Amino acid sequence: MNYDKKRILIVDDEEDLTWSISKRLTKEKDSVEVMCANSGNRALEMLAKYRVDLIVTDIRMPGMDGLQLVREVKSHYPKTQIIVMTAYGSMEVKDVLDRWGSTGYIEKPFEMNDLRKLVFTYLERNEKLV
């Protein structure tokens, strides 16, 4: 078993939401480190500095949106998993994300426990692939 902390990057322009998600995920203090970015551009800056195992990103953000972020991440960091959260979901968006290699998808509003389960499911799945 890998005892290294898994690093999660939460990306959303709503600071209250990134804070809430961060607090909910860090209940597993020994297994994850959570970082937050409030824009797609800031997320890319952080990815250039830190190894990130999983990104949880919103789609609608000013500047670089979540779809552009997914495309950039999969182009430069193909092993990084991505969960997209959106209040504006559609089958077309899901299809595009699947083609680009997005790992998961959750529609807002969601229960924090549902997101938490999804995050830890993907982190465990990734650990088994290593």
Image (cartoon, helix red, strand yellow):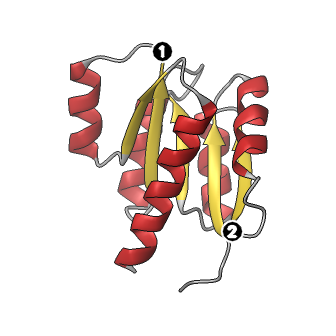
Dividing the picture into quadrants, the one containing residue 77 is bottom left
28 and 83: which is toward the camera: 28
> Tag 1 or tag 2, which sits nearer the N-term?
2
Disc 1 secondary structure class? loop
Residue 103 image offset from top left, x and y in percent? 36, 48
26 shown above or below 36: below
Image coordinates of residue 110 in percent, x first then y, are 54, 24
- Mark whose residue sits in front, 2 or 1: 2
Q: Residue furthest top?
A: 88
Q: Residues within 10 Å of mark 2 (few under 14, many from 20)?
A: some
- Where 34 falls versus 69 (above or below)? below
Residue 23, quarter of picture = top right
Q: Amino acid at mark 1?
A: Ala
Q: Quadrant of the C terminus?
A: bottom left
| Residue highlighted by disc 1 | 87
Q: Quadrant of residue 127?
A: bottom left
In the rendered image, residue 63, in percent from the top left (x then y), is placed at 58, 24
- Residue 116 in the image: x percent, y percent? 58, 44
Residue at left offset 38%, top offset 42%: 104
Q: Which mark is residue 31?
A: 2
Which element carries disc 2, helix, strand or loop?
Answer: loop
Residue under the image location 37 percent in, 61 percent down: 78
